[in-house]
C-alpha cells in the first residue's frame, strides 16, 4: 500500500526530511510517496503563505488520489488545506497538526504545543478549536524560531524549544508535548528522553494514523462539507484546476 | 473615501449586483470600487472552490490597498480568505458573513442563517465558532439552491428561502435572519416585511461596518496572526505573489 | 438624523465629555442628543449602582424614542440596562461596552479590556459571555482607578492604564485593547500611538455602529426577549413608568 | 433564625402564596418574613418590568439585612436583582431560579425548565449560562401562560404546564423538571406524581438552601463583584437609596 | 431522620473525623450514621485507588438505603462512585466535592479549589466540567500534601494550604475557596478568618445540602443514567453484589 | 508484538467475538491476546455494572502489562476504567468508545453514535465531553436493544440500529456513525454499504490505533493524572490488588 505525503511548501530539503521521518515509522509493506507543490512559498508562516501553498498542494493530492494511493498526509503543522483535500478524496487525509493532537490526547490528559513563530499561534488555536481538542491543550507556545532555521544547527533552535517544553511542564501542567512544525520531526525522541514526558512528532503520528485508517478501510465521508466539488468552470490561469 | 468590495468568484453579473447593493447603502462621499479575481471558480460552493478563489482575490485586495482605499469587503458569505487579507492590510477588512452575524447580534438575541447548499453549512459553522458568535446562532440552514440559481427568477429560490425563514422562527426561536449568500442581497427588505423580523443582508452590513471602522480610524492590528507576511520567495507560477 | 446618547450616571461633566466624544465621530448630517437620568448614582461602580441608574435611564430612552431619534447609545461600559432599553425601542440600541468588543473583534484576533475597578470585572465578564465574544477576549483587567478620578489629571490614572496595556500585550497576547469606561474616551488615540496596537474607545465605537445600523434600516427585533413590555400596572412611585 | 423572602412584584396575593410555600418547607425554629416592594410592577414579564422591580426590592433586602435576618430569598424566577442584593448583604442571598437549578442538578443528570411566557426564556437562558448550569439543562420551555393567570383556576394553566413536561421527557431527555415561576409553587408535588419524575419548585428549594447555608455559617464573599457598594451620592428621587 | 455518610477509604480515624464534622452541622433531629468499606485502599489518591474504593462503598450505600436513611453523603472529594450510588438510591446522594462547589457558587462569583496532590487535579477538573461548574472555578490547586499527612500536625500541611489560598486570591481572582479533601474539614473556619474570604468544607456542605434535599422530599430521578440497575448475574467473587 | 484486548464483562462469547474482530484488523506480526475479568457483571449497562467490572479488568491489564504486551484495548464502549488502567501502564491504553470517536473525527466533520440502551447515553456524553470530541458529535442515540440481545439474531437489533442511522443522517446531519457497543462489531461493514456513509466499529478502531501508537513508540504519560499509583495498603478482600 502507498501512502502519499505532501510537503505544502516548495523547499526540497524539507520534503526529503519529511519523507525520511515518514519512512522511519511506516509499517511493513507500506511505500511512502513524498512530493511538494510546483508553485508556492518556500515556507509557510502565517495566513498569506498558506493561501498560496494550497492550490499547488491540492494538485498533488488530486494526482496521487488518481494514482491509487491508500491515503494522504499533509505535512504542514497548520493542516493547510485539509478540508479542501478531503473534499477531493475518498481515501483518508490527515494533517500533521491534527495527527499530533490526536496522538497526544490518547496518551496524556493534557498537552501543550511548541511551534515556531508567534504569528502561527492563532492558526493552531483555530484548528484545535475546530477539532474539539482545544480543551485538551494547555497552551500553544512559540519558540521564536523561523521554519528554515530548523535546518540550521547553529540557530540555537533546539535550546529554545527545550526552554518552552520546561515552561509547559511548569506553567501549563502539560503531560505531553506536541512539536508544532514538520521541520522538528527529528527532535522528538531526544526531547522526550531529556524532559521525561512524551514528545509527539506530527509527521510520524500522521503516517501511523493514516496507515491505521487505511487498514481499517475507513474512507472520508462524502456527506456534508467533504462532498465532492460540483462540476463548474474555473477561469483564467486556474482553468486546469476545475473539478 | 473609497471602499473596496471584492467578489471572490469570477462571475461578472454577481460582481455588478454586489456593487449595486453596496452603493445603495454607502454613505455620502463614499465611493464603492468593486472587482473580482482574474482567475478562479465562477461560484464558491465548498472548500475546494474556496481554495482556488483566494489567490486571485488576495491580488485584488493587495492592489486596492496600494491604491489607498479606506477598507475592504470580501463579498462571499464564507468569508473566503479573510485572515490572509487582513495580514496584508492596515485598513479594516470585513467579510460579509462576519458582518451579517455582527449586525444580527446587535439587534436580536438569537439569529438563524439561511444559506444556499448544505455543503456550505460546515464552513459557516466553523466561522461562527471562531468569531465567537456561534452561541448567538440558532441554526445554519440550507435552502437547497445553487448560487447561480439565485440569478434565475424561475428557480423558485425565493420560496425555498422563505420556507426556511418560517422554520427558523418556529423551530430555532430565531429573532432575526442572516441571509447566507451575496447573491441574496436584493431579497432582504421584502423578506423582512413578509416574515415580520429583521432579515440581514451581509453585503449592506459589511459596507456599513467597514465605513464605520474607517471613520473611527480603526486599523487592523499588526500584532499576532495578522502580522504582515515575512519577505520570502514564492516559486513557479506564484512567484509574482510573493510578499 | 438624530442619535441619542445617554450617560446613565448623573454627573453632568461626564455627559458633556461623552457628548463631545460622540460628536467627534458622528458622520455628516448626524445630530448627537446627549442627556442623563434625573435621578440615580453619580457614577456606576458595581451592581448596586447599576440597579439605581437604570430606571432614570430608561425614562430618557423612552422619551428620546418618542421624539423620533434614529438610535440610542448607552454610555456606560457595563451596558447598563441594555436589554430593557431594547424592549422599549424599535430603533437600534447599543451599549458602549458591547460596541467596543464588536469593533475590536473586527480588527484583531484577540483583545483585552482595561477597566477602572476590580469590582467591575465580573459584570464585564458576564456581558462578554452573553454576547459570545468572551472567546475573543484575553482578559478583563482593572487599572485600579475610580471612575471620577479619570476627570482628575493628578490621579495618575493614565499611567496605570498604560501599565495594564503593556501587561495585556505581554501576558494575554492581546492584539488590541478596549478601554473599559466612558470616562476614558479621550485617551484612546494617544494610547494607541504609544503602545503600537489598536486602542478602542467604546463611545466612538457605539456612535459609529448605531449610525451604521440606522443607515442600514436595521431595527431591534420584537420577537423573543426584546418584545415590547406588556401593558400592566406599576404601583407606588413607579406608576408613571408603567409600559 | 429568620429567613427573609421577598416577592419582587407588588401583587400581595402572590406574596402570601409564596410565604405559605416557604413556611411549608422551613425547618424547626425558622421564621419566614415575607414582603414585597412598595413600588414597581404587579408582575415581572421581561426585562423592562425587571428594571422597575429591583429598586424597591433592594430596599426591602437592605431593611431585612439591617434587622438581622439569617438570609434572603428572591422569589422571582428571573432571579431579579440577585447580584445587587448580594453586594449589600453578608448573609446568603438565593434566587428561586438559581435554587431550582441547583436542586435539580443534585438529583438528576439533566433537567428542563417550564416557565410562563416565551419572552422570559432569554433571561432564564442567560442566568443558566452565568451560573454554569446551562450544560445541565435540556431546554427552557414556555407554557404560554401569563403570571397572574396562574392565580386563576379557569385559565387552563395546569394542563399547559403538564403538556410541556411530557414534551420535555420525550424531546429533551429531561430527567427532572424545574417549574419556572414562583406562582407555580403549589403544583410541584402533584405534577411529580403525575409525570413520574422530580418536579422542583424554586421557592421551596431556595428556602431549604438558604437555611442550609445559614446553618453552615456560609456568608456572601465580599471580594470581587459582591464587594459592598462604595459610598457616593445618589441624586433626585433616589437620594434616599444611596449606599 | 438519619443521614448516611460513607468514607470511601478504609482509614477508621478519617471516618471518625468526618462523622464529627458531619454531626457538628447536622440540624435538630438528624442522626448521622457514618461507616466505611470493608475492603479497599486506606486513602484515595488517583484513579486506581478510586476503582478499588467503589465496590465496598456501594455495598455500604445499598445497606444504608435498605435501612431507610433519608440520604447519603460520599465523603471523598473525588466524589468517588457518585453516579453508581445514585443508580441504587431513590433518596438523594451527594458527593463532598460536588457539595463544596455548589455552596461556593451560591456565595461567590468565582472560587478556587485547594486539594492535596497534583495527581488529583484532573479528576476534580473532570467533575467540575461534568457538573457544569467549571466556569465558576478559577483554578484547582494542589498543596502537595498526602491525604494521611493531614492527620499529622507536624506535616506542615496547614501552611502549605494557606499559601495556596493566598495564591488563589492573587492569581485566580478567587472570591471563595473550596477545600479539596475530607481530611481538611477541621481547617475551614480558621482559614476563613485568616484569609478574609469564605472557605468551604465539603463535608459540612454535603450534610447540609442532603438534609435540605431530604426535607424538600427531593428524590434522585430514576429516568436516564440513574435508572435502577437491570437484574443480571455477577460472576465470581462479585456474585453477592449483583443488582 | 502482542496487543492485549480485555472484555470488561464476563461473557465468554462476547470475548471471543471481540477477539475475532480484533484479529481481523491486526497488522502483520501482531498477536491479539484477549481475556475477561474473573469476577463481575455479565454485561455492562449503566454506572453500577461499570463499578463492578473495573477491579477484575484492572487485574487483567496489570497482568498483561507485566507480561510485556505492547498496548491494551478496553473493549467496552463506556471506556470502563480507562483512566485507572492508564495509571498502571506505560504502554498505550485505548477504549473502544474513545477509538471510535477519534476515527470518526478523522474522516467526517460530524458523527452520531448509536448505542444499546438509553441509560448508557449519559455515560457516553460524559466521555465525549472529557475527550473534547462532544463538539464533533451530533447526538448519542439509543437503539433500545440490550447488550446480550445483540448475540441473538431474532432480536431485531439490526433493524433498530438501522433506523437510528437513518434518523441520524436526517436529523443530526451526521456524516459518519460510530456503533456504540463492542457487540455490534460485526455489523459495521454492511451498515456502511446500506446507508452510504462510514460506520465505525470501536473494536477494530482501537486495535488499529493502539498498534499505531505502539509502532510510534508512544507511551502513556506518567505526569499528572496517569502517574503510577502510590504504594499503599488495600484492606480486606482487595489486599491483593494494592499497588
Image (spheres, coloured by chain):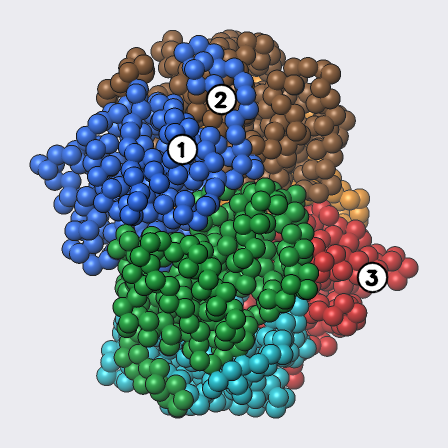
Chain colours: A red, B orange, C brown, D blue, E green, F cyan
- Let me know if residue D198 appears in the view: yes
How far is the residue under mark 3 from the one under mark 2? 60 Å
- Earlier sequence position, callout 1 versus callout 2: 1
Mark whose residue sits in front, 3 or 1: 1
The reply to whether callout 1 and callout 2 are in contact (CB within 8 Å) is no
State which chain disc 2 sits on: D
Q: Secondary structure at mark 1?
A: loop
- Let me know if residue A33 appears in the view: no
Q: Which mark is residue D68?
A: 1
Q: Quick one: quadrant of the N terminus of chain D?
A: top left
Above-or-below relation of C3 to C81: above
Pointer 3: what residue? A158
Q: Residue B95 occupies which quadrant of the picture?
A: top right
The reply to whether label 3 and label 1 mark residues of one chain is no
Q: Residue at x 52, y 26 (%)?
A: D229
Mark whose residue sits in front, 1 or 2: 1
Pointer 2: what residue? D243
Q: Position of residue F174 (x, y in %)?
A: 40, 60
Q: Residue C136 occupies which quadrant of the picture?
A: top right
Q: Secondary structure at mark 3?
A: helix
Q: Position of residue A8 (x, y in %)?
A: 69, 58
Q: Secondary structure at mark 2?
A: loop
Q: Nearer the viewer, residue F181 or D201?
A: D201
State which chain disc 3 sits on: A
Q: Nearer the viewer, residue B64 or C232?
A: C232
Q: Nearer the viewer, residue F145 or E137?
A: E137
Q: Position of residue E104 (x, y in %)?
A: 48, 48
| Label 2 crowd bin: few (<14), some (14–19), many (20+), radius 10 Å | some
Q: Residue furthest left?
A: D154
Q: Residue at x 47, y 11 (%)?
A: D235
How far is the residue under mark 3 from the one under mark 1? 65 Å
State which chain disc 1 sits on: D
Amino acid at each position: 500500500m502507498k501512502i502519499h505525503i505532501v510537503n505544502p511548501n516548495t523547499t526540497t530539503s524539507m520534503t526529503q526530511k519529511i519523507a525520511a521521518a515518514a519512512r522511519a515509522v511506516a509499517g511493513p509493506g507500506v511505500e511512502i510517496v513524498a512530493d511538494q507543490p510546483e508553485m508556492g512559498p518556500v515556507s509557510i508562516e502565517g495566513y498569506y503563505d498558506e493561501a498560496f501553498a494550497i492550490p499547488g498542494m491540492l494538485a498533488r493530492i488530486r494526482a496521487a488520489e488518481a494514482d491509487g494511493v491508500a491515503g494522504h498526509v499533509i505535512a504542514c503543522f497548520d493542516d493547510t488545506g485539509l478540508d479542501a483535500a478531503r473534499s477531493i478524496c475518498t481515501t483518508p487525509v490527515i494533517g500533521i497538526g491534527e495527527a499530533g493532537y490526536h496522538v497526544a490526547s490518547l496518551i496524556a490528559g493534557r498537552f501543550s504545543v511548541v511551534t515556531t513563530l508567534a504569528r502561527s499561534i492563532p492558526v493552531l488555536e483555530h484548528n484545535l478549536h475546530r477539532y474539539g481538542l482545544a480543551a485538551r491543550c494547555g497552551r500553544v507556545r512559540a519558540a521564536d524560531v523561523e521554519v528554515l532555521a530548523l535546518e540550521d544547527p547553529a540557530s540555537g533552535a533546539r535550546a529554545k524549544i527545550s526552554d518552552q517544553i520546561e515552561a509547559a511542564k511548569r506553567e501549563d501542567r502539560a503531560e505531553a508535548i506536541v512539536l508544532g512544525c514538520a521541520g522538528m520531526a527529528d527532535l522528538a525522541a531526544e526531547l522526550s528522553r531529556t524532559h521525561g514526558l512524551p514528545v509527539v512528532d506530527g509527521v510520524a503520528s500522521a503516517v501511523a494514523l493514516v496507515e491505521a485508517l487505511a487498514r481499517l478501510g475507513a474512507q472520508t465521508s462524502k456527506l456534508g462539507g467533504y462532498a465532492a466539488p460540483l462540476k463548474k468552470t474555473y477561469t483564467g490561469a486556474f482553468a486546469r484546476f476545475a473539478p
